[in-house]
């Protein structure tokens, strides 16, 4: 028969693994792409924070480009697209749709704000 103390000692390493995984889990930020905007179009993250930008295009195949971090993705209608990001510098960085989606396309942009 295993004592309570022994059970606790056996369970402790497993608890540490679960806690470590929970701390390193990426934050998911859902973004909707539609003519001619992203919603939200301002995203705030912390420097070094692991995030996933999850895009859903609702009306047209759009694009996503964040040149300063060399990120780019094609956004297909009703198919979530996930882009991982772990910013290494502080600042304001513009992102935009790089797939022409009609008159107003040039206004489809947003800002990533990376804070310390």
Image (spheres, grey):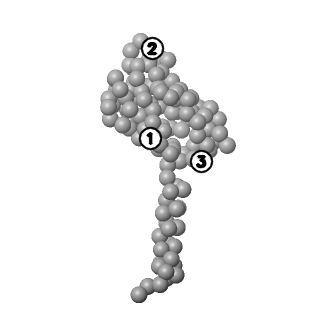
Q: Residue at 49% across / 17% down in the picture?
A: 107
37 vs 48, left or right, is left
Q: In the structure shown, which secondary structural element does the residue marked by tag 1 occupy?
A: strand
Q: Number of numbered discs present?
A: 3
Q: Which residue is mark 3?
A: 48
Badges 3 and 1: C-beta atoms under 8 Å apart? no
Q: Residues within 10 Å of mark 1 (few under 14, many from 20)?
A: some
**Residue 87 appearing in the image:** yes
Residue located at (42% from left, 29% from top): 32
Side of 73 relative to 115 (left or right): left
Q: How far apart, in angstroms, are the residues tagged by discs 2 and 1?
A: 25 Å
Foreground residue, 100 or 81?
81
The disc label shown at residue 104, or none: 2
The x and y percentages for residue 20 are 53, 61
Classify mark 3: residues with Cα within 10 Å, few (<14), some (14-19) or many (20+). some
Q: Residue furthest top?
A: 103
Tell me which numbered mark, 3 or 2, is placed earlier along the sequence: 3
Query: Does label 3 or label 1 sit earlier along the sequence?
Result: 3
Q: Where residue 1 appears, x then y in whole percent?
A: 41, 87
Task: Provide residue 29's location: percent of width, then percent of height.
Answer: 48, 39
Classify mark 2: residues with Cα within 10 Å, few (<14), some (14-19) or many (20+). few
Q: Identify residue for label 1.
A: 83
Q: Is residue 96 visible?
A: no
């Amino acid at each position: 028969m295993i004592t309570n103390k022994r059970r606790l000692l056996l369970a402790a390493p497993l608890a540490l693994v679960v806690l470590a995984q929970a701390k390193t889990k990426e934050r998911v930020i859902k973004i909707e792409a539609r003519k001619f905007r992203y919603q939200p179009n301002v995203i705030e993250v912390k420097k070094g924070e692991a995030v996933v930008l999850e895009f859903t295009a609702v009306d047209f195949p759009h694009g996503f480009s964040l040149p300063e971090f060399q990120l780019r993705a094609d956004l297909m209608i009703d198919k979530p697209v996930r882009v991982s990001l772990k910013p290494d510098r502080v600042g304001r960085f513009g992102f935009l749709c790089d797939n022409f989606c009609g008159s107003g396309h040039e206004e489809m942009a947003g800002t990533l704000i990376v804070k310390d």
